[in-house]
Image (cartoon, rainbow, N blue to C red):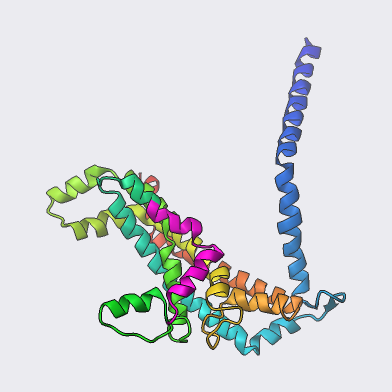
């Protein structure tokens, strides 16, 4: 009897060990990719941030010199300011467009499936080089924007891309146009709101604006929170669109010189890998601070029904 009771746990342990090994075997391709292309490069960039490294000669440890140089670099502060302007204007615009279109698509319309696909397409192709090139053509002096203004009797000779006052605006509009992923998330949230809430509010005399403020927005706050965090991270790390639309130098007059573009120039044009690594870690800290602030403030404005139930 004693031998039977000791044999079963041993068999269970062998089964559990075999399942564990099989699990690690299945995820081993992901683990190899994660350590080779994410974890070790992150550690390497942290080391390079404290060195003078030009890719051609071995890195030389220099302590905090790269970070002190950042504080004296006018282009670093310029790129930081441009990125802040871009993120803090484009993210609210994108979320507002996404919510507005999601509310329209939540109505009982004909061909609503077609419209959902149409509004999601910009998010699929918006990050491509082709769309960025097309966007640049649209806002040039002889582009379609000035042609439309001309047909309305407004003759404009402005190159929206070439004007320092409007160049960043074209990038913001390009970001706002790509609201498809946020729209789908909002649309899924709208469909989860019970109709009885709106019916009860309607009986109590609430108008559509009051129902939007007191029912729709509170019910969607978890999704607003999620979209805000994700889109803010995307806003701080914009690169491809700025590189194509504004050019590799952030023209005109550095008005489109976003942070990632300046980092790229330091790393792959001037081969200052140590300096670029320091910039990368500063950007990581900035994103972490803003993400932490959003998480910290979420208890003030994010509504979870489960907590109150």
Q: Main secondary structure of the magenta part?
A: helix
The image position of residue 37, as x and y in percent, is: 73, 57
Question: Is residue 177 found left or right of 52 in the rendered image?
Answer: left
Q: Is residue 133 above or below residue 20?
A: below
Q: Residue at x 38, y 55 (%)?
A: 119
Q: Residue at x 12, y 54 (%)?
A: 205
Q: Residue at x 55, y 84 (%)?
A: 251
Q: Is residue 170 above or below residue 9?
A: below
The image position of residue 266, as x and y in percent, is: 69, 79
Magenta segment boundaries in residue numbering: 118-141
Is residue 278 among what the camera can see? yes
Q: Is residue 154 above or below residue 173?
A: below
| Residue 276, image quadrant | bottom right
Q: Nearer the viewer, residue 120 or 34?
A: 120
Q: Nearer the viewer, residue 42 or 160?
A: 160
Q: Is residue 21 magenta?
A: no
Question: Is residue 269 found left or right of 136 in the rendered image?
Answer: right
Residue extending farthest to the top is: 1
Q: Nearer the viewer, residue 291 or 120?
A: 120
Q: Residue at x 77, y 66 (%)?
A: 44
| Residue 141, image quadrant | bottom left
Q: Quadrant of the N terminus?
A: top right
């Amino acid at each position: 009897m004693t031998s039977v009771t000791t044999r079963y746990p041993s068999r269970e342990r062998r089964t559990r060990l075999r399942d564990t090994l099989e699990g690690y075997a299945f995820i081993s391709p992901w683990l190899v990719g994660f350590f080779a292309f994410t974890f070790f490069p992150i550690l390497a960039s942290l080391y390079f941030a404290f060195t003078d490294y030009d890719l051609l000669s071995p890195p030389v440890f220099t302590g905090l010199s790269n970070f002190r140089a950042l504080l004296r670099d006018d282009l670093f502060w310029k790129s930081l300011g441009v990125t802040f302007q871009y993120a803090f204007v484009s993210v609210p615009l994108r979320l507002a467009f996404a919510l507005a279109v999601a509310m329209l698509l939540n109505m009982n319309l004909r061909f609503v499936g077609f419209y959902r696909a149409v509004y999601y397409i910009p998010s699929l192709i918006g990050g491509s080089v082709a769309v960025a090139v097309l966007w640049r053509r649209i806002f040039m002096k002889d582009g379609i924007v000035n042609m439309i203004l001309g047909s309305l009797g407004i003759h404009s000779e402005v190159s929206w891309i070439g004007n320092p006052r409007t160049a960043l605006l074209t990038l913001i509009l390009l970001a706002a146009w790509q609201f498809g992923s946020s729209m789908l998330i909002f649309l899924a949230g709208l469909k989860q709101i019970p109709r009885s809430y709106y019916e009860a509010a309607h009986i109590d005399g609430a108008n559509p604006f009051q129902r939007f403020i007191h029912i729709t927005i509170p019910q969607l706050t978890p999704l607003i929170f999620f979209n805000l965090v994700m889109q803010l991270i995307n806003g701080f790390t914009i690169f491809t669109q700025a590189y194509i639309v504004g050019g590799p130098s952030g023209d005109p007059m550095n008005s489109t010189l976003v942070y990632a573009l300046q980092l790229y120039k330091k790393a792959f044009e001037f081969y200052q890998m140590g300096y670029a690594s320091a910039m990368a870690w500063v950007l990581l800290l900035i994103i972490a601070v803003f993400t932490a602030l959003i998480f910290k403030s979420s208890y003030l404005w994010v509504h979870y029904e489960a907590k109150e139930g």
